[in-house]
Image: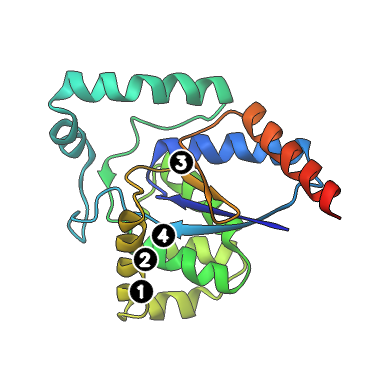
Amino acid sequence: MIKLDIFSDPICPWCLIGKTQLDRALANRPDHPFTIEWHPFQLNPDMPAEGMDRRTYLERKFGGKDGAMRAYAPVVEHSKALGIAIDFDGMKRTPNTLNAHRLIHWAGIEQRQTEVLDALFHAYFIDARDIGDTDVLADIADNAGMDAAVVRRLLGTDSDLEDIRQRDAAARDMGISAVPTFIVAGKHAVPGAQPPELWAQVIDEITSQLDTTA
């Protein structure tokens, strides 16, 4: 098997688009060689713990309403093309995602990262829920087959907080500055939301190489 490390943030729309496109490629190549692990990267590491009003955040980040609309136009286009019904109007707050990344880490220990990632993306982008909220995260954990009571208790502590911060910082030290970023076999970086056709090509090339060396 070949390791595919994915750096992402569950409030990043391009991460949702990138995962959707990767998933479609993997579905078309059910014998793909990838073992997937998700890693933390906060788009907004300085976001207040309580998050902030989403409109205010976007207008500050992109230089006003018009800038925010221009920045999100490609997101709207790509999500519609993929059939992703993002509830832009319903999304009122941009959360701090540190706790969401802690949940993803714990899900990895239980081999449930994919289920939790899917649920986080769906909760934030489709259901317009605040994934910085402890109750929402506990509910996501429960639906993914994790112990919600344990997750709720851990979220009330500092467990793994520093570990997530250090892993985020390590990703930046590696040169990662935007997500999604995919690292194939620990050495080949594939930045951005890539189409299924590219992933199909990557999978076929890797499979061919593995067959040659077998």
Please provide percent x and percent y for residue 62. 18, 29
Per the image, label 4 sits on a secondary structure element best described as helix
Mark 3: amino acid: Cys
**Precedes in sequence: disc 4 or disc 3:** 3
Image mark for residue 136: 4
Q: Residue at x 60, y 56 (%)?
A: 114
Per the image, label 3 sits on a secondary structure element best described as helix
Mark 2, residue position = 167
Q: Are marks 2 and 1 in contact (CB under 8 Å)?
A: yes
* Real-space Cα separation, disc 2 to disc 1, in angstroms: 6 Å
Please provide percent x and percent y for residue 167. 37, 66
Q: Which of the two marks, 2 or 3, is nearer to us in this view? A: 2
Whether residue 133 is visible to the viewer of this picture, yes or no, is no
Crowd rating for badge 1 (residues with CA inside 10 Å; few <14, some 14–19, many 20+): few
Mark 1, residue position = 163
Q: Are marks 1 and 4 in contact (CB under 8 Å)?
A: no
* Real-space Cα separation, disc 4 to disc 2, in angstroms: 24 Å
Mark 1: amino acid: Asp
Please provide percent x and percent y for residue 87. 41, 32
Q: Nearer the viewer, residue 7 or 130?
A: 7
Per the image, label 2 sits on a secondary structure element best described as helix
